[in-house]
Image: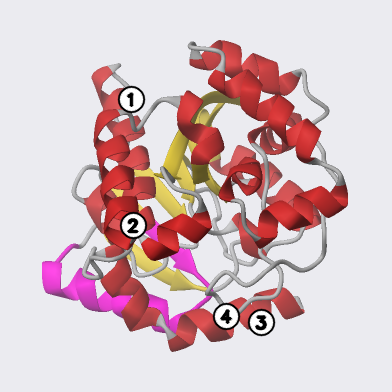
Amino acid sequence: MTTDQQDQALRFFNMTAKEWRRKAEGAIASKVNVVAERNATVLRVAAGRAAAGNPVTAFLDIGCGTGELVIAMAERCQKALGIDFASEMIALCNQTRGEKRLDNVSFATGSIFDHAFGEQTFDIISAMGLIEYVSVSELEKLAALCHRLLRPGGSLLVGSRNRLFNIFSLSAYTEMELDLETVTSLLRESTALAGIERSDAAIAACRALPGSYPSVSSHPITGIGVDTRHQYAPSELIHMFEIGGLTARGLFPIHFHGLCVPAAKSHRTLYVDIAAAINALAPTDHRLVPQASSFVLHFEKA
């Protein structure tokens, strides 16, 4: 059974599947290609595993959208699977698979919780742009499911809307955090990330934080027709997924904002240029996370 939030998301993505593919392919020049930045993070982790003697043979993408990441990984591993609950997205995935004549990639429509995996396990599982549409209890279930599906030493990469960015955006989201009286806590986490150079030390600092902040049930408009799009600070996801048996290994900024949101709306070209420059120069520097609108966390299974 889906929630009202998930029904809204399903309607939105089925109606906008073709536009979503254009965004993912970078066809809309005035937009920062968040999908490409997230996908590049997964590909870097896969390359790092291969360089360390742990090549990826089986890959799973949860909430695969129009399938760009699954196709890219299929060209690098033996088997790749993408799952999405929007049938129009999966139709586009299968169209691309047919055009490229790839026989080691498959796509499935439905919920990750309902899919019959059998004995399948994976070296890498990615979930990009997914967790904002599931409840906290479902997110805990997702952590447990991914732990079960990962092979020992396997990697889980989770993309999230970044709650820390709310205090730098100077937008309606900043007003929301002021009303919730969470600004001091979010600033404390942001300062910890920005002030520590080594990634492992920054993750340790997040572990020492409370790992849970007051939240709301609906959010300001984001351009996607869904009332509730969950946000998390890195510490919140680290606490949640490590309880599920995974260990955080890396934290990466996605969609860096050099301008606050009101200024970015007036200076679109500058805003996009700054984001592209940062992504080219420092895509793995966790110190940039507080001023990025989303982030990717890399977890490993022992």
- The mark that comes first in sequence, 1 or 4, is 4
- Nearer to me, 234 or 145: 234
Q: For the residues marked 4 and 3, what is the alpha-carbon distance in whole angstroms?
A: 5 Å
Residue appearing at x 24%, y 52% in the figure: 72
Amino acid on which disc 4 is placed = Leu
Please name the residue that numbered disc 1 is placed on.
49
- The mark that comes first in sequence, 1 or 2, is 2
Check if mark 1's residue and mark 3's residue have beta carbons within 8 Å: no
Please name the residue that numbered disc 3 is placed on.
7
Badge 3 crowding class, 10 Å Cα cut-off, few under 14, some 14 to 19, many 20 or more, is: few
Q: Quadrant of residue 99?
A: bottom left
Amino acid on which disc 3 is placed = Asp
The rendered magenta stretch, by its main secondary structure, is classed as helix
- Nearer to me, 123 or 157: 157
Q: Quadrant of residue 111?
A: bottom right
- The mark that comes first in sequence, 2 or 3, is 3
Q: Secondary structure at mark 3?
A: helix
Q: In the visual, does 108 lie left or right of 171? A: left
Badge 1 crowding class, 10 Å Cα cut-off, few under 14, some 14 to 19, many 20 or more, is: some
Q: For the residues marked 1 and 2, what is the alpha-carbon distance in whole angstroms?
A: 28 Å
Which mark, by number, is residue 10? 4
Mark toward the viewer: 1 or 2:
2
Question: Residue 128: where, in percent of width, then height?
Answer: 48, 53
Badge 2 crowding class, 10 Å Cα cut-off, few under 14, some 14 to 19, many 20 or more, is: many
Q: Secondary structure at mark 4?
A: helix
Residue appearing at x 31%, y 36% in the figure: 278
Badge 4 crowding class, 10 Å Cα cut-off, few under 14, some 14 to 19, many 20 or more, is: many
Identify the magenta region: 81-102
Please name the residue that numbered disc 2 is placed on.
32
